[in-house]
Image (cartoon, rainbow, N blue to C red):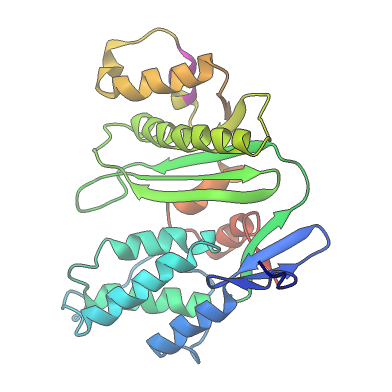
């Protein structure tokens, strides 16, 4: 073994030391993606995905270079290791890799324009508290084609984001409460895995991990020991979350929608709202 000095780059991840820790970023990798897509000199965009989509006569026509589309999307998936702010946009574009249309290519160009203006963005890892906490949210029936919902969550170790996910739910939720509850079950699974991992690192979480949710009905359902007939279709999730609460693994608390960080992972947001939430997850060199 050899001492190669302070860590600067590893598997495409770069580090920038700060007074409280480091910033993990992929500036060089992001620039390679832009060069491959021919967008290195493009005009930066304020958000990765627009809140309103525009249609044209060619929007529904197949994109003439689907191989390039898939290449860029695959590269962007690796870029999300240090860029939670683009996770939702990448997830949306991944839904169309089989037959990308011109409208999907236009959305990809918008995402690349956002990346072009934020290549110095990364995630901060701070030497502070090691208390685990999470945020979870869902956007009910947001998919206009099959009316599935989007689940999104992020977990923090102290003030450092350590895991996040955006995923289309596999079943159709019949209410916003059900969509939020399914997202809560997914987030709880991730929290349990992180708690076990931290225990192996001798950083045991002595208290239940707080998971913040902005849906009061889902929280009431999680804490209600009575199993109602109207929740039989989500029976497994109900028993799983209640078991986690009973064993003091998690504690579900309410949070105002305006402070819900996981809102960033479930929908396209206006510029001011997007920048406010992304600043809680990322840092700039």
Asked whether residue 213 appears in the rendered view, the answer is: no
Above or below for 56 versus 25: below
Q: Could you tell me which residue is drawn at 61 percent across and 69 percent down?
A: 25
What secondary structure predominates along the stretch shown in magenta?
Answer: helix
Q: Is residue 194 magenta?
A: no
State the image coordinates of residue 47 (x, y, percent, origin top left). Answer: 51, 69
Of 36 and 219, which appears nearest the observer?
36
Question: So how many labels did they put on this image?
Answer: 0
Which residue is found at the position 38% from the left and 86% from the top? 37
The extreme right residue here reads: 19
Which residue is at 70% across, 73% downward? 4
| Residue lying furthest front | 1
What stretch of residues is rendered in magenta?
Answer: 219-224
Q: Residue furthest top?
A: 226
Q: Of residues 254 and 65, which is closer to you in this image?
A: 65
Question: At which x and y percent is residue 89?
Answer: 41, 63
Residue 114 coordinates in the image, percent (x, y): 50, 75
Q: Nearer the viewer, residue 84 or 199?
A: 199
The answer to whether residue 155 is seen in the rendering is yes
18 shown above or below 267: below
Quadrant of the image containing the N terminus: bottom right
Rendered-image quadrant of the C terminus? bottom right
Give residue 58's quadrant in the image: bottom left
Q: Is residue 222 magenta?
A: yes
Question: Residue 198, image x and y in percent?
Answer: 61, 37
Against 113, residue 124 (above or below) is: above
In the rendered view, tell whether residue 106 sits above or below residue 91: below
């Amino acid at each position: 073994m050899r001492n190669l000095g302070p860590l600067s780059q590893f598997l495409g991840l770069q580090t920038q030391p700060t007074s409280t820790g480091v910033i993990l970023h992929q500036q060089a990798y992001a620039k390679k993606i832009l060069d491959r897509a021919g967008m290195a000199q493009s005009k930066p965009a304020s958000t990765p995905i627009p809140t309103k989509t525009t249609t044209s006569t060619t929007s529904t026509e197949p994109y003439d270079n689907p191989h390039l589309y898939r290449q860029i999307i695959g590269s962007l998936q690796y870029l999300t290791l240090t860029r939670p702010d683009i996770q939702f946009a990448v997830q949306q574009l991944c839904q169309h890799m089989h037959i990308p249309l011109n409208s999907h290519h236009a959305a990809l160009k918008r995402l690349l324009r956002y990346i072009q203006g934020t290549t110095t963005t990364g995630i901060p890892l701070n030497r502070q508290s090691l208390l685990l906490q999470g945020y979870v949210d869902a956007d009910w029936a947001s998919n206009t084609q099959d009316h599935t919902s989007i689940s999104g969550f992020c977990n923090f170790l102290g003030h450092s984001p350590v895991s996040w996910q955006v995923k289309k739910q596999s079943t159709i939720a019949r209410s916003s409460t059900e969509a939020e509850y399914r997202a809560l079950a997914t987030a709880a699974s991730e929290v349990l895995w992180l708690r076990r991992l931290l225990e192996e690192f001798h950083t045991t979480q002595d208290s239940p991990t707080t998971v913040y949710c902005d849906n009061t009905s889902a929280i009431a359902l999680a804490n209600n020991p009575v199993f109602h007939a109207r929740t039989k279709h989500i029976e497994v999730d109900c028993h799983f979350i209640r078991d986690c609460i009973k064993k003091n693994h998690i504690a579900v608390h309410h949070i105002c929608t305006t402070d819900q960080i996981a809102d960033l992972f479930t929908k396209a947001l206006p510029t001011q709202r997007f920048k406010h939430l992304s600043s809680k997850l990322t840092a700039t060199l």
